[in-house]
Amino acid sequence: MQTLHTLVIVIQILSALTIIGLVLLQHGKGADMGASFGSGASGSLFGATGSSNFLSKATGIAAAIFFAATLGLAVFSTGARKPSGGVMEGVTVVQPATNAAPASAPAAASAAAATSAPASSAGQAGQIPK
């Protein structure tokens, strides 16, 4: 099974490189635009392109092979393992450690901090000393 998976990956890479090469070799439709304005052949600007040549047919075949290889890889990847329920499926929840201090301890600590604040008006927030 691993050999078939590797073979499909090689086929996909080769077809992708073939598509890149064939597209770069083809003559673009916009290349005739410059000649049409100077020579009076305005029919080639928006006219029919005629029958497809060897490069465009080969590009279509390479694209079909690429899509078939991609579909094959998708089938291989979902058939090898069971689909998961989500990204948080395997996460374990850690309970925080309980403190021996009573629940009123944080309130008492904040009350003590409030009484130890400086009594001068310059130290309070929002006031500027004169």
Image (spheres, helix red, strand yellow):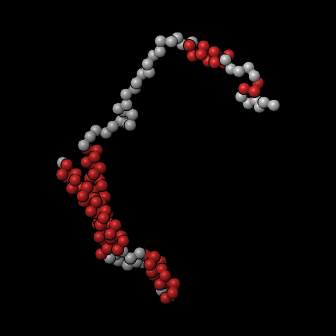
Q: Residue at x 57, y 12 (%)?
A: 104
User: At which x and y percent is residue 17?
Assistant: 30, 64
Residue that lies at the very extreme toward the right in this rendered image: 130
Q: Is residue 39 visible?
A: yes
Residue 13 lies, with reference to residue 82, above or below; the image says below
Looking at the rendered image, the quarter that the C terminus falls into is top right
Q: Position of residue 124 (x, y in %)?
A: 72, 26
> Is residue 60 visible in the rendered structure shown here?
no
78 lies above or below 29: above
Among the 4 quarters of the image, the one containing residue 55: bottom left
**Relative image position of residue 31 (x, y in whole percent):** 44, 78
On screen, residue 23 versus residue 119, left or right, reads: left
The residue nearer to you, when weighing 61 against 120, is 120
Q: Nearer the viewer, residue 18 or 127?
A: 127
In the orientation shown, which residue stands out farthest toward the bottom?
A: 39
Q: How many labels were placed on the picture?
A: 0
Q: Is residue 127 left or right of residue 15?
A: right
Q: Identify the residue shown where x is 28% and y is 46%.
A: 77
Does 73 sit above or below residue 53? Answer: above
Report x, y in % for residue 37.
Answer: 51, 84
Judging depth in this view, the residue of 10 and 47 nearest the camera is 10
Residue at 40% across, 77% down = 49
- Residue at (63%, 18%) from the top-left corner? 113
